[in-house]
Amino acid sequence: MKIIFFGTPDFAVPSLDILVKSEHEVVAVVTAPDKERGRGRKVSYTPVKEYALQYKIPVLQPEKMKDEQFHSQLEKFNADLFVIVAFRILPEKVFSMPRFGSFNLHGSLLPKYRGAAPIQWAIMKGDDKTGLTTFFLEKKVDTGNMLLTAELPITDEDDLGSMHDKMSITGAELVLKTVNLIETGNYELKDQDDTFASPAPKITKETCEIVWEKPARTVFNQIRGLSPFPGAYFIHGNKQYKVYKSRVAEDCKINPAEIKTTKKEIYVGCSDCCIEILEIQPEGRKRMTAEEFLRGYNF
């Protein structure tokens, strides 16, 4: 099948790679526009564009999805299918172009966690499993009829970084299975039951702030759901501290937000017990272990 692939971040690259190396033909890639970064305003490409250039795949980078010139460019490729992985919302005029339609890879077991940050919210809510879903695009975001799903466990050792990496690989396999299935025409679509739907809104600064008056397990899940980016944080002495790794210390009992330290350990009180901070980043400094932090800092 002739495919146009829509994607931007690292998460999408394994899916693009598996399609490029399959029997199908990726005729073009659509990704976000280049950005200027850093003091030298050096132009940086998206991970998907960098991959596409290696394989000499045509790259489209529209500023707006409703741009008529962009639509004309898409039509010229005469693609059979559009595959969307970690990209922005497409207008109906775009996703209805190919004869086989357009499908999206979503980082949750839909209809659970519809929205921009499904992996983060699954971890922050303390779920013991998550997964991926492929579904055909419809007007309303993340509501289309489902094709295939894949489940993955979430352990206490997992954080956003580890789940992101595992899900990007599993997601790639699911994408190829879905393309192959669509090509056969022999599949059954499954409706999403809206009564089981839950939101996974964009992560904001408010989402990242730790509220120590909550149970320790809730704080623990928040920390790992936001690690390594953007990082959960708290304010102490008018300074911000990001926390990347922690554990629930059930044998510790101090008041919420109270900080207790030893030569190597940092404990912060929650509503029921404590969080032991294992990795921390003071404002304007690098990430470090609690022991490294306590050699030069104190609260």
Image (cartoon, helix red, strand yellow):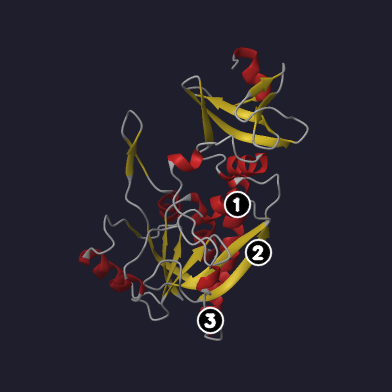
Q: Which of marks 2 and 1 is nearer the N terminus?
A: 1
Q: Mark 2 points at which residue?
A: 151
Helix, strand or loop at label 1? It is loop
State the CA–CA distance, disc 2 to disc 1: 17 Å
Tell me residue 237's x, y (percent).
50, 19
Does residue 175 appear in the picture of this structure?
Answer: no
Q: Residue furthest toward the top?
A: 296
How many residues crowd mark 2 within 10 Å: few (<14), some (14–19), many (20+)?
some
Residue type at mark 1 is Lys
Quarter assignment of residue 174? bottom right
Q: Which of 279 and 298 is in front in this view?
A: 298
Tell me residue 131's x, y (percent).
61, 62
Quarter assignment of residue 216? top right
Residue type at mark 2 is Glu
Q: In this view, does 11 lie above or below 294?
A: below
How many residues crowd mark 1 within 10 Å: few (<14), some (14–19), many (20+)?
few
Tell me the mark number nearer the camera, choosing from 2 and 1.
Answer: 1
State the CA–CA distance, disc 1 to disc 3: 29 Å
Tell me the mark number nearer the camera, choosing from 1 and 3.
Answer: 1
* Horizontal side of residue 180 vs 139, given as left or right: right
Q: In this view, does 298 lie above or below 170?
A: above
Q: Which of marks 1 and 3 is nearer the N terminus?
A: 1
Q: Name the residue under label 1.
A: 125
Q: Nearer the viewer, residue 49 or 163?
A: 163
Q: Name the residue under label 3.
A: 189
Disc 2 vs disc 3: Cβ atoms closer than 8 Å? Answer: no
